[in-house]
Structure formats: structure tokens, C-alpha cells
Amino acid sequence: RAKSDGRGIWRYFEPAMNQRMHERRQLELDLRRALISDQLELYYQPIVDVASRRVKSFEALLRWDHPQRGQLSPDLFVPLAEEIGLIVPLGDWVLRKACMEAAGWPEEIGVAVNFSAVQFQSRPLAPQIASALQESGLRPDRFEVEITESVLIKDKEATLATLRALKALGVRIAMDDFGTGYSSLSYLQTFPFDKVKIDRSFTCNLDQSRKSNAIVKAVVSLCDGLDMAVLAEGVETEAQLEALRREGCSQAQGFLFSRPVAAQELPELLQRLNQTPAITIAAE
Ligand code: C2E
Ligand code: MG
Ligand code: MG
Ligand code: MG
């Protein structure tokens, strides 16, 4: 039972809180070490053209190979990295690594990199990206910045200036997880997006829910009018892909094509996805 001992009822929560704080502190120490001891890696997931089924680009997704806990998902440590400010050097590592690796891919294949709101606010992004592009030799039009709505709600004017600087650099900008955050339509009008990525919570119900179909259809027609490309995240079945094709969604990403894979698996994945005809006709 909570006990008021001058420090208030918090005493009741102390053991559990201490445990959690201890775990967090440990993860924090581990993460600082991870950055300097080569435990981080980028995985890549293909972004596919719906009509041709060919790979257009890859999204870079951060993985942490924790010495005791094994491979950790970014959902587990990116928020922590944001809180302790480590996202800035970490994000810089991601940016440079992604550019370096993408520079070695076929010319027509691009790379998409996620940027968190904290990264966005903590330093001028355009010069940082310009330097990574220059260092790697990657053409700006092969690079795409992915941001979520949380970036946009902070300081509208500063964000707009940054996005314009990015456009001037020649890189593309995508709005990630569309439909899950604040999703104000005015964002689509105000900010110069090249692409909208429909969150997978809509994709996963495609063809089972008339509502999801209607939402995808509406976003597609909205983006058509705004000259923005539309991508559906989290495509897992042929039926979902078929529904997307029907609704006019031009790009897709999801386990149907491939899970995110390590960089060294990309040549084989590209070979499989881009050279195998969608329909294989048995010979003779
Ligand atoms: P996101 O940018 O929306 O990335 C898509 C997430 O959906 C990835 O999770 C991917 O593995 C997962 N996914 C893709 N296709 C499917 C599918 O068909 N079904 C299901 N169920 N899931 C699918 P992941 O890699 O765990 O990343 C989670 C989030 O962490 C990302 O969401 C992104 O917001 C963040 N993140 C990842 N890498 C970075 C990074 O380098 N920097 C920053 N700031 N954030 C990152
Ligand atoms: Mg993303
Ligand atoms: Mg997303
Ligand atoms: Mg996400």
C-alpha cells in the first residue's frame, strides 16, 4: 500500500521504478558503446513499383546486434537514443553508412533514410546530408528523406526552411506512417513532399475492410492531385497488392516482396526480384 512518508505516495512505486530505471540506464550505457564498437548495422527493405513489380529503392532500417540480447528492433532503442541525445551521432552514422552502401548499388536504385524529429531540430540537416552525399559520391536524386508527422508539429517555419533546403539539394522527401499521427491535411499543402507512405495499419486490412480500401483510395486521389507519389507500407499478401493496384497506388513495400535484409544479401535479392518475371510460364 502507498505510504505517505514525506516523500509522498511515490514510495509505493519505488522498487518497480528502480528496476526500470536500472534497465534503462544499462541500455543507455550499452547503446553508447554500440555506436563505437561496431554493433550497429543497416538492413534494407525493397520499395517496389506496383505496376512493374521492380525494385526502385531500398529503405535503410537500423539494427542493433546487442552482445547479450541479440538483434534489437529500432522501436526498442531509437526512442531512448532520442531522449539522451544519442540520436544525433547515431543518425549521422546511419546517414553516412546508407550513402556509402547505396553508392555501390546499380545507378537506378535509390535509398530512403529515416530521420527522427529530434535529429531534425538539433542541427541543420541539409549541409549534413550534402556532406554525406559528397563524401560517398551518391547522386542527390537517389536519396530520399523519410520523416513522420511528429517532425512537422514542432516549429513549422524552421521545418519548412529545412525541407526547402533539402529540395534545393535535389533529394526527395517522403512523409512516413501517414494516417497514424496528427495527419492534418494542411501538412500536405504546406510542406513539399514528394511521396506519402500510407501506414501499414491501413494496408493490413485491405480487402477485408471496405473502410481501409476507401481510405487508401482517398489518399491516392489526394496525392494524385498534389503530384505526390503514394506508397503502401506493410504489404504482405497478393490480395493486398491487387487491391493497391486497383486503387492506383504506385509503390509498395512489405514482407510480400522481402523482409529487411543485410547489405550483403542485396545483390541476390535484386537479382531475384528484378530479373524473375512476375508470371512464370512452365516451358513445354
Ligand atoms: P518505418 O520507417 O515505418 O519502417 C517500417 C517498419 O515496418 C520496419 O520496422 C519494417 O521492418 C516493418 N515492416 C516492413 N514491411 C512489413 C510488413 O509487411 N509487415 C510488418 N508487420 N512489418 C513490416 P523496423 O525496422 O522495426 O523499424 C521500426 C521503426 O524504427 C521505423 O518505422 C522507423 O520509424 C524507425 N527507424 C528504423 N531505422 C531508423 C533509423 O535509422 N533512424 C531513425 N530515426 N529511425 C529509424
Ligand atoms: Mg520509414
Ligand atoms: Mg513507416
Ligand atoms: Mg514507423
Image (cartoon, helix red, strand yellow):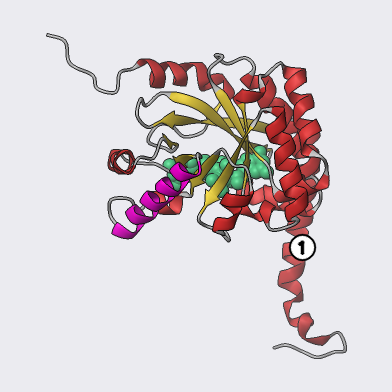
Q: In the rendered view of the protein, which quadrant contains the N terminus?
A: bottom right
Is residue 143 visible to the viewer in this orientation of the structure?
A: yes
Magenta highlight: main SS:
helix
Q: Is residue 219 magenta?
A: yes
Give amino acid for label 1: Met
SS for callout 1: helix
Which percent across, then down, holds residue 18? 77, 67
Which percent across, then down, holds residue 263? 58, 23
- 94 to 21, vertically: above or below: above
Is residue 37 visible to the viewer in this orientation of the structure?
A: no
Q: In the rendered view of the protein, which quadrant contains the C terminus?
A: top left
Compare residues 207 and 259 and report the one nearer the observer: 207
Q: Which residue reaches farthest right?
A: 6
Residue at 48% in and 50% down: 199
Other-residue count near label 1 (Cα within 10 Å), few / some / many at <14 / 14–19 / ≥20:
few
The residue at label 1 has a CB less than 8 Å from ligand 1: no
Which percent across, then down, holds residue 102? 62, 21
Image quarter where ligand 1 lies: top right
Q: Which residue reaches farthest top?
A: 284
Q: Is residue 217 magenta?
A: yes
- 138 to 251, vertically: above or below: above
Q: Is residue 153 left or right of residue 258?
A: right
Q: Is residue 258 left or right of residue 34?
A: left
User: Which residue matches tag 1?
Assistant: 21
Q: Which residues are magenta?
A: 210-226
Residue at 54% in and 29% down: 58
Compare residues 250 and 225 and report the one nearer the observer: 225
- 94 to 118, vertically: above or below: above
Which percent across, then down, holds residue 216? 39, 50
